[in-house]
Amino acid sequence: MIVQLERDSATRALAQAVSVLERKSTREILEHVLLEARPGGVEIKATDLKISLTQTLPGETSSPGAVAVPGRKLYEIFRELPPAPVRLELEENRWLHITAARSSFHVPTERADEFPEFPAAPEEYRPFPAASFTRMLEKTLFSASNDETRPTLCGVYLHAHEDPSTGTETLRMVSTDGHRLTIMEQPTPGVLDMFRDGIILPKKGLASLKALVDDSGEGFEIAQSGGRIFCKLANAEMCLTPIDGAFPRYQDVIPSDPRNRVILAKEPFADALRRVALMTDPDTHSVIFEAAENRVVLRSMNAHAGDSREELEARLEGEPQKIAFNASYFIEALRHLDGDEVKVEIDQPLAPCLVRSDEDPGYLCVVMPIRID
Amino acid sequence: MIVQLERDSATRALAQAVSVLERKSTREILEHVLLEARPGGVEIKATDLKISLTQTLPGETSSPGAVAVPGRKLYEIFRELPPAPVRLELEENRWLHITAARSSFHVPTERADEFPEFPAAPEEYRPFPAASFTRMLEKTLFSASNDETRPTLCGVYLHAHEDPSTGTETLRMVSTDGHRLTIMEQPTPGVLDMFRDGIILPKKGLASLKALVDDSGEGFEIAQSGGRIFCKLANAEMCLTPIDGAFPRYQDVIPSDPRNRVILAKEPFADALRRVALMTDPDTHSVIFEAAENRVVLRSMNAHAGDSREELEARLEGEPQKIAFNASYFIEALRHLDGDEVKVEIDQPLAPCLVRSDEDPGYLCVVMPIRID
């Protein structure tokens, strides 16, 4: 195998490939990327068995061939190479020789046939608008869990949702770590039927896909086949295996029409939360939120460090409220919410509390309250 | 005690104060800063017993007094306060009440008389030019050791040095961690006699002093008294207790007139070092440097990850050389060296290797070589 690549595009592709790899895999081959040199270019493949990514790069192939190369090391090398064409040659002893200008590297390789097979891509794809996809993920990915003992929470749940009052259908992305939940929905005609049964896609794979979409600046095409989701971009194809299991019946816990609503300016609210967060109890991070006629008072207390109190102008629709919640969940919700004004909706003190904005239609954050002793 | 402060200047002063505190002290009072409110302003004091810092801030004192407050927490609070005057009031129960606009905090305090006494400042100071001080520290601080089992290496050695050939005297700052060494000297008339015996000042204190000097943008005054160094800025005074013990006799190990010299372009050399560093043995980080007539070859090898080779144009004055060294020490030396061209001077393969530039007079980096097996 002998091929010559352009440094910058290859470095970007390797960065994407590495984002798919396991950091420390039990199977060494899964820390490798597969390079397949063909006339006119090279394919770079990476997989953790649940997510597989194929990227196509233009290149001058003088001798076709395929080889598996340690992914992270290859990326580190490309990142530091001088600005010059990069030549890759698989030598007799099966080491890969990498040269650029007067720089030269040898890295050990594994045989291409050790590399896992990728699922066959389907024939038919349907377009998914990039802006809509990126926006939905930005608003939901952060609240998915990292707790691998609860696998169904370690992803984003995508499902077609029909509004019972209007009958209009939207695509919903939902994620929760058990303490807070986010829902983003957008009309996404053309792909809804793929998500009619609901599907949980892994957080890591979606983050990689989002980076690819952001990087290309273009939309992508999507298909479902053999229980997997396939995404096709101009120079990349990704296959995501959904997470097995049922996503929690989240709709059951969200009050459909909360009785009380507090309206606040978002930025001052976020600033005040950051301050009271400084004095919370280190175990609960609990902040008390008290809403009266025309103001909100936030309070926190820590037996050792002291206490804090913030007062904010607010508009109350309903009864005065007193609830407690984890400050950081609220701060993160506000960070992802667009608009100058935010609505905090409370049905009753121990019911999930809704956070949304008229300026951010289709988006809802839900924060579980903490019991006040 | 009741005093009102301007938020931004107080936050900056607290950041400086916190840089002096121990991260985790065995004496709780050393995690505190002392606030002393007097007519017209407040003094903020911080110490780790070896470094003490007093900063003066203007403020409106309605009731004088003094109190010790947890330093890091106070800084965190100030950093998040809204842009408004900040009022501090020591309440009856000895909690400090901090208010700004509609934000309010209480923090526990310790009595001012628990706070360590500061050494009495001398009467007479002499000016030290800021630019010279900052430049000297930038070039030496990084190579001081962090290994607390070798205390004399955890500081910068300042001493007056007389050039034996010209008889001119300069101030030298020297630091070493046992593997590399840096020397920066500048004519600093007026303060040389203070450093005639040589003195080791602690790395942390010098870093704090440098931040104060950089922040003020002005020079400072210096004095020596009772074995300590005192520095006076417009709004701050710092006292540094030297580190006890003898600094290594570094001059003995530096070849005074190395027999061989290799001249290279600095940036390509640094880039190449970063690349070969990727493939070094993880234990030694060893890179082989081979200088011939008109080129330098760098090589590294790692039994698992592979190998690398770089070739650079160079000018050799003397005999061809082959030495090995830790890549990261060389990379750091080049990062601190000014100029486009660098001279690597080698007396013999196991003698310390000198790195300097004609464009950076007064500065010398020394890297200890590694034995080649």
Image (cartoon, coloured by chain):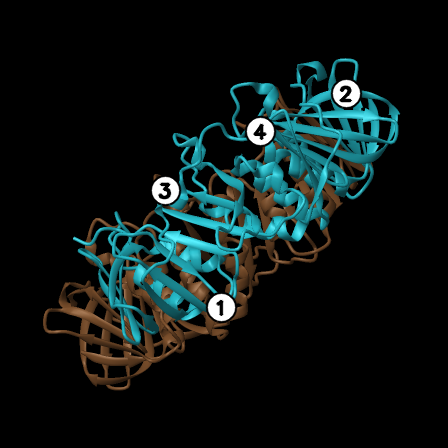
Chain colours: A brown, B cyan
Q: Amino acid at mark 4?
A: Thr
Q: Given this view, does label 4 or label 2 mark the residue nearer the observer?
A: 4
> Left of A285 or right of it: where is B121?
right
Provide residue A13's location: percent of width, then percent of height.
Answer: 37, 70
Q: Given this view, does label 2 or label 1 mark the residue nearer the observer?
A: 2
Q: Mark 3 near mark 1, Cβ–Cβ under 8 Å?
A: no
Let me know if marks 3 and 1 both belong to one chain: no
Mark toward the start of the polypeptide (4 vs 2):
2
Q: Which residue is mark 4?
A: B241
Cα separation between marks 2 and 1: 55 Å
**Chain ID of residue with mark 3:** B
Residue B323 to residue B242: above or below: below
Could you say which is closer to the camera, residue B270 or residue B80? B270
Q: Which of the 4 image quarters holds residue B16?
A: top right
Q: Residue at x 59, y 27 (%)?
A: B227
Q: Mark 2 near mark 1, Cβ–Cβ under 8 Å?
A: no
Mark toward the start of the polypeptide (2 vs 3):
2
Mark 2 residue crowding within 10 angstroms, few (<14) / some (14–19) / many (20+): many
Q: Which residue is mark 2?
A: B66
